[in-house]
Amino acid sequence: MAAGLPPRAVTPGEAPLEVLRRVFGYDAFRGEQQEIIEHVVGGGDALVLMPTGGGKSLCYQIPALVREGVGVVISPLIALMQDQVDALRALGVRAGFLNSTQDFEERRLVEAEFLAGELDLLYLAPERLRGEATLSLLERGHVSLFAIDEAHCVAQWGHDFRPDYLTLSQLHERWPDVPRIALTATATQATHTEIASRLKLQDARHFVASFDRPNIQYRIVPKGEPRKQLLNLLRTEHTGEAGIVYCLSRASVEKTAEYLTQHGIQAVPYHAMLDPRVRAEHQARFLREDGLVVVATIAFGMGIDKPDVRFVAHLDLPKSVEGYYQETGRAGRDGLPSTAWLAYGLQDVVQQRKMIDGGQGDAAHQRRQTAQLDAMLALCETVECRRGQLLAYFGQESGPCGNCDTCLTPPETWDGTVAAQKVLSAVVRLKRERRQKFGAGQIIDILLGRKTAKVIQFDHDALSVFGVGTELTEAEWRSVVRQLVAQGLLAVEGDYGTLVMAEASGEVLGGGRTVKLRRDPVKAKTARPAKEAAARQKAAAVELSAEAAPLFEELRAWRAATAKEQGVPAYVIFHDATLREIASRAPSTLAQLGEVSGVGANKLAKYGERILELLAAR
């Protein structure tokens, strides 16, 4: 047997529930896990749609352990394979990977382990299946199943499309008797259908779990000074906690990371143009350290398995609800209260529209992108429950959740027809009387009757609409313009974001259409959900007695030192939820410790005595 690999942890044919308890340390399956596992163990194909944190990995890991042979997992997450393998080996599972980060000797060793049947799971990057050498290797070994992780990457116009995924249909052609399980946390009905078609899984059993993540509080706020707004969020609700901040551009990533660092928040940047070694170091730090914030483009995050990410913040509007759902889903994988926070403004809409108009792809692709953006704007502007609207996008029904900003502080609506007519009249008069087009700032100055240098230069104070909008503030007018653009009642064009009439504008101007608008909350109201969220998070995240709380911190310190010594992320040792339960129950024997959720047989043997020593020393 190759050095470093333990004996097989599971006897082939062992009951899946026993494997769950003994290897993974959990008492019961969740949701449809058991049905999926038993179906795949029996040799059936499966397509699984399950939210992040819902336990997708167990759906292929346990069948791979129970069935004869090696489970082959196709994953695009090259940078995370080492951590995935480390986490499995900590459980006593014989896991390995093959990807471009390894040298020849490392790959040769893993290949030998695979051929000798000394692995339970082998992780592969999809591009390796382009080469005949890897396909030949798999044919010479004994494959128990194929798991296609992040299966939405096969969707050609999706937000994470990977061309190499298109070749994975060959798995069924070359290994028709080996069961396949494709898994994703993000799929509309259209994406679901595309995955099934491209991977030839139409005849597989399809399992669709609820996409609801009730522990995540969704909040969308009007964008003012986004970095200051973000800093306030972190200081008031997430002090010393790990999180991800998404920005649209590399420049914004760098500036935001620098801004947070200057204001006492531990933050590092992550984007595609960073030196690869620096990028890898920042990702490794995020996974291994407590309380670090990563500021990133969407190049960061897929497959991030860090369970204690307490917040995901967006400083720019995501391109689609699918992207937004997947990115926010990286928060709270441990089930504890977490925040999904987005600052959103008119310039976001302008920028996204411009990117669509100037992007690649045919007219049909642009229509798809526009529809995706419109759905994202509808989520931002809704006066209904955000979670309900989010789930409806994925074809699932839900009542008010009581844990999003629109539920906690229901927004007011108002009849904005007259205000809309004033904006549209200003746009029309500039076009007809001056043959000019301007952006929102100039339109608002005209409506407010401001004699700025630009207004005087173009004689705009002579227009009949000059000063007709003093009943609203500048911020309120910006909200009106933003919502008109979001509703398709006003259009944006050109590099400078000039406002022009849309197809439906005439109906509003002519009085044939009523315009309902959302009133942006004032600062006094936005504080309420923040305080409620902070109180809820403290209560749920701790749930420890005065005696147990210091013990929990001692256990975390022990875990951090152990993880550093072993060179693995802290969660590979134990999740926070497991340490909390240990601190609360204070077990005095190995048998009692083994009853704690997340303490499997291998971890009990490896760390049990040391934990009992820590508990006894108090």
Image (cartoon, rainbow, N blue to C red):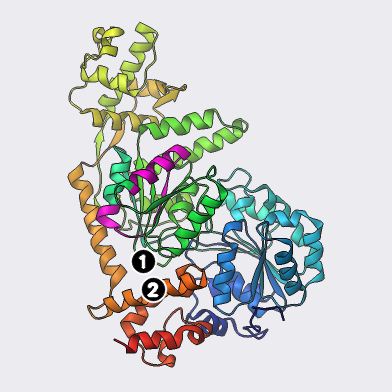
- How many numbered circles does the render carry? 2
Q: Position of residue 147 (x, y in %)?
A: 65, 65
Labelled disc at residue 577: 2
- Residue 336's label in the rendered image is 1
Q: Say above or below: 463 vs 607.
A: above
Label 2 Cα neighbours within 10 Å, binned few <14 / some 14-19 / many ≥20: some
Residue 260, magenta (yes or no):
yes
Q: Is residue 540 magenta?
A: no
Nearer-the-camera pick, 117 or 180: 117
Q: Which residue is at a point 54% across and 71% down the rendered structure image?
A: 87
Q: In the picture, which quadrant includes the N terminus?
A: bottom right
Q: Viewed as shown, does residue 137 lie left or right of 507? A: right
Amino acid type at mark 2 = Ala
Q: Give residue 205's quadrant in the image.
A: bottom right
Percent of width and height locating residue 492 = 43, 25
Q: Nearer the viewer, residue 110 or 195?
A: 110
Q: Nearer the viewer, mark 2 or mark 1?
A: 2
Q: Nearer the viewer, residue 257 or 424?
A: 257
In x, y percent, where is residue 309? 40, 60
Is residue 168 placed above or below 414 in the rendered structure? below
> Residue at point 50% right, 35% down?
370
- Segment colored magenta: 234-261
Residue 575 visible in the displayed image: no
Determine contact: label 2, label 1, CB under 8 Å. Answer: yes
SS class of the residue under badge 2?
helix
**Disc 2 and disc 1: Cα gap in Å?**
8 Å
Per the rendering, the mark at residue 452 is: none
Residue 191, compared with residue 464, is above or below; it is below
Identify residue type, mark 1: Leu
